[in-house]
Amino acid sequence: MNMASGGDSHSSTSEVDQVQANSESDQMDSEDSKEREEPPAIIYTSSARLPPRTIPADQEGLDQWRRDIWESVLPPEYEHLDSVYLVWKRERLSHLCLKPCVRQLLDDLGTHFTIGIVTNGPSVAQWEKVKETGVQKYCDSVVISGDHNVEKPDRAIFDIALAELQVKPCECVMVGDKIEADILGGKNVGVKMTVWLNGRGKVAPNDIVPDFTIDNIKDLQTVLYKS
């Protein structure tokens, strides 16, 4: 999930640590089945028919869509789908949280900058993450692509965030971990500075060059205050 921010006199964008469990459109890893006495675990078969990738627009529909994925890969005789799904959802939501260092970073940045999120994804799934992490309380704007039918790196979604933050592109910094969406998007809209959070040591493409690269979100303050 990517943070964007505008400042008081010099506005900025910030990056919230990636929220774990982006599993709305993941179709679960494949496992070979083995005969067991107990009920089998999740199994993929070559004949499994997966649900459409389009995620419904409401929570009830999202839950049913997820159940349909599970049902499509479980054997017909499996009797524990509802209980397994509830356990999975409970565990997933329990891990949707901001690390203490990220909460402290947002608190500190909030005293000097206005902060906003620009994130790609289906509306109901992304708002579920925003709600469970509690990140919205740190933000002056939350823009989700599923609410606007446009996504990063299209400058139009950044224009929405800029309007909500009431800042100009030249007053902003874009921070993100997806170079093709966040950094390119920031450059498309003409922000003052881009910061790539590259915790996995990826190599940037030659045609997308961030102004700064950090491997830990805790280094963001150093970059912002020295720039």
Image (spheres, rainbow, N blue to C red):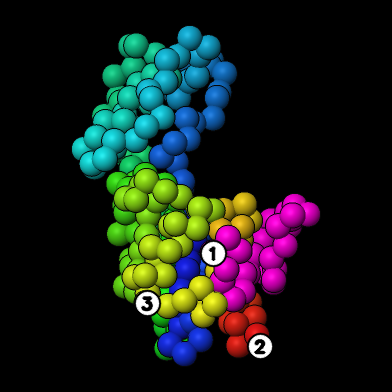
Instruction: Provide the residue span drawn in magenta.
Output: 187-216
Q: Quadrant of residue 207?
A: bottom right
> Is label 2 in a helix, a strand or a loop?
helix
Mark toward the viewer: 1 or 2: 1
CA gap, disc 1 to disc 2? 23 Å
Left or right: 200 with respect to 144? right
Mark toward the viewer: 3 or 2: 3
Q: Which numbered disc, 1 or 2, marks the residue that appears first in the sequence?
A: 1
Residue at 31% x, 30% y is: 65
Q: Mark number for residue 226?
A: 2
Q: Quadrant of residue 222?
A: bottom right
Q: Position of residue 127 (x, y in %)?
A: 32, 54
Q: Mark number for residue 166?
A: 3
Q: Position of residue 100 (x, y in %)?
A: 46, 73
Classify mark 1: residues with Cα within 10 Å, few (<14), some (14-19) or many (20+): many
Q: Which numbered disc, 3 or 1, marks the residue that appears first in the sequence?
A: 3
Q: Mark number for residue 189?
A: 1
The kind of residue on which mark 1 rests is Val
